[in-house]
Image (cartoon, grey):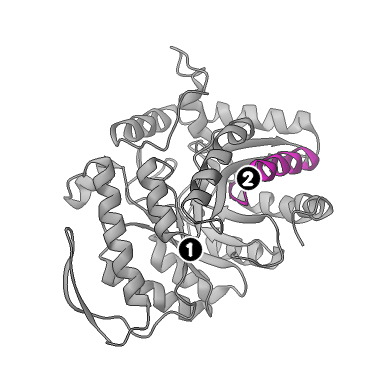
Amino acid sequence: MIGGPNKFKVAIFGANVTTGQGGLNLAENTIKLGNWGEIQGLAQKADRYGVDGFIPIARWQGLSGPDRPWGRQFETFTWAAGLAAATQNIQIFATCLVPFIHPVMAAKMMATVDHISGGRMGLNATAGYFKPEYRMFGVEVPEHDTRYELADEWMTIVERLWAVEDDYQFDFDGDFFHLQGAQSWPKPVQTPGPMVMSAGSSPAGQQFAFKHANILFAAIGSVEHSQSVTPKLRENADAAGREDLGLWAGVHIICKDTEKEAREYLEYVEEKGDYESALRYKHIIQNGDSRGWSWDHYKKSEDPKQDETIKTFFRAGLVPLVGTPEMIVDGLQKLQDSGITGVCTGLVDYDEGLDRMNEQIFPLMRDAGLRA
């Protein structure tokens, strides 16, 4: 996903939890997480179709019970190992909540999966904000910027464990980690290590990405919102000497043969929205001091069924792209024009959505010069 022939990258997002990044809704044909073959089949289909990446979300706890959206979750490192062995070309990520996984353990697991995949492993490093999961692990939630100080130290250790140094082991004495004789062999296939994505776009999150990441996942709510937010991120990255940093967005694609069909399907998804889970998730984000999220451009209402700050989570809070294949590609082109270089894609029906991507969206992206 770094370089390569595709000017604009496309990854599939969230296929490790029930309903995936199709959102907090109870629509038909979403990910059920009933068996491993369901997820392996999606990854293999994405691999055949030339999708660039397969990226999970890191959830350890459901919002409203095991039979509701995000209620069941596959752990992301073992998920990545299984898919690495079952695919050939696609970049497979693990998403890691750094407060919950020790950096020596993470570095070793990543190197192992990088060998299984032949050098196709990636890390999505997240500082965390989900207070109920912190409580489940018995860990206190640090203040926002302190979380990134911890993440910086964590990532520094991982990078040293991946590097080839004169000594085969090292000591580390930081504010959060104190290690003696730290080592991890064999080293990853990729040099200097697996590629790294970061999702924090607050000032502290940006500084973490500028220091450690290959891709910064920008927090934008719409195509129009990207036109004002993304150029500022690009300016900040360039000023930090990171002209090479990719800026990505999360999109939620509803593609049908006609605009009328797409709008009707969007109405169906909203009718099937899980209001209880969406409201709870909004509260968790707010109470977790997740500063990368902006609510300013959403339409608010006293009626929760009309409040866009809640309804957005029916689409997992991602940029909505709704319409015909031509309309979807027009939206992707506008994102690219604003400075976005790739997208993590949530789908309601992942199986049908991947087919439409291959048969309808990718050909138009090639015609537009976005893909090889």
Q: In this view, does 261 lie above or below 206?
A: above
Taking the spot 49% from the left edge, 19% from the top edge, the residue there is 307
Is 179 colored magenta in this rendering?
no
Element carrying mark 2: loop
Q: In this view, does 368 lie above or below 41?
A: above
Residue projecting furthest to the top: 302
Taking the spot 59% from the left edge, 36% from the top edge, the residue there is 226
**Quadrant assignment for the N terminus:** bottom right
Tell me which amino acid carries mark 2: Gly
Taking the spot 45% from the left edge, 51% from the top edge, the residue there is 17
Camera-side residue: 349 or 85? 85
Q: Main secondary structure of the magenta part?
A: helix
**Mark 2 to mark 1 CA distance (whole Å):** 23 Å
| Location of residue 363 by image quarter | bottom right
Is 343 colored magenta in this rendering?
yes
Query: Can residue 222 be seen by looking at this rendering?
Result: no
Find the magenta span and give its range.
325-346
Label placed on residue 339:
2
Which of discs 2 and 1 lies nearer the camera? The answer is 2
Taking the spot 30% from the left edge, 50% from the top edge, the residue there is 148
Label placed on residue 104:
none
Residue projecting furthest to the right: 367
Camera-side residue: 273 or 10? 10
Residue on which the image places disc 1:
93
The picture places residue 219, in percent across and down from the top left corner, at 49, 39
Camera-side residue: 227 or 82? 227
